[in-house]
Image (cartoon, helix red, strand yellow):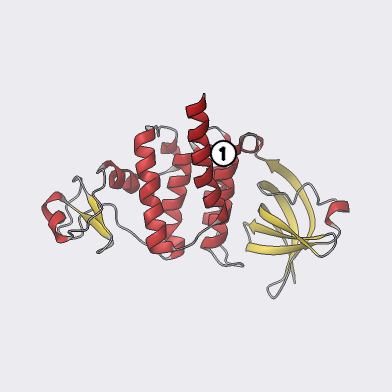
Amino acid sequence: MVMQETRGLILYNRNFREDDKLVKIFTEAAGKRMFFVKHASRSKLASVIQPLVIADFIVKVNDEGLSYIEDYGQVRTFHGIQSDIFSLAYATYLLSLADAAITDGTYDPHLFAFLVKTLDLMEQGLDYEVLTNIFEIQILERFGVSLNFHDCLVCHQVGQAFDFSFTYAGLLCPQHYDRDPRRSHLNPNVPYLLNKFQHMQFSELKQIRLQPGIKKELRDFIDQIYEEYVGIHLKSKKFIDDLQGWGHMMQKNS
Ligand SMILES: [Zn+2]
């Protein structure tokens, strides 16, 4: 076992035996790990092992089995996110997506930083649906999925009214639409935005404003991409899909 100091983000915790807990933490220095907390309710760690808490931890990392938290400091929570059921649902989905994208113990400080930064922007009140889309698109690579939303897969022209072909896993320009009779018939703004999302820098994010119609089209298409190329079904995503229905119902009644 190695003693280490690292920042860490709590992904989730779950009960284990009588009063113990297993806590999944995404650490900056040692990847995701499962930590064992004995007598969790009476432990000084009780408040810090909640999802969406970031802290500096001193940990004993065990490559073979469970790891242990020795101490912590500099605790940060996302009060803004947690005070709203919608942003909380989206943030929770991002945590589970990051958890699904890499195996435990994989050193991935870039994904750690990207996840924390995305949560920071959500906390600041930026559009959580758009932030989630950007996160979903950029994390595709971690699932081994690399899609080109930049140029036509036949002629490599750029800046066209592209459509997406699932048959060829790429874009078709209007001259080459006929290569795939079952092309997606997307609004060309969808691949245009996905290309932007793939290369988006955080500094550009503040300017993103999208209308509900295009957001719905993005949501539907990213769902298709995940269904086709990733194939995971996260409970936290199902919850968001259900929430959408509730949101609409509330709007209708108001
Ligand atoms: Zn073409």
What is the quadrant of residue 33 in the picture? bottom right
Of residues 207 and 227, the one drawn nearer to the viewer in this rendering: 227
- Report the residue at 47% width, 40% height from top: 129
Rendered view: 204 above or below 163: above
Residue 6 visible: no
Q: Quadrant of the N terminus?
A: bottom right
Measured as percent of width and height from the top left, residue 26 is found at 63, 57
Residue 48 visible: yes
Left or right: residue 21 versus residue 227 is right
Rendered view: 134 above or below 79: below
Left or right: residue 88 versus residue 225 is right
Residue at label 1?
87
Rendered view: 153 above or below 201: below
Measured as percent of width and height from the top left, residue 63 is found at 68, 73
SS at circle 1? helix
- Report the residue at 73% width, 54% height from top: 57
**What's under tag 1, amino acid-wise?**
Ser
Of residues 201 and 77, the one drawn nearer to the viewer in this rendering: 77
Q: How many marks?
A: 1
Residue at the outermost bottom position: 64
Of residues 139 and 201, the one drawn nearer to the viewer in this rendering: 139
Indicate which quadrant contains ligand 1. Answer: bottom left
Measured as percent of width and height from the top left, residue 22 is found at 74, 61
Measured as percent of width and height from the top left, residue 168 is found at 24, 64
Local crowd size for mark 1, using a 10 Å CA cut-off: few (<14), some (14–19), many (≥20): many
Residue at the outermost top position: 254
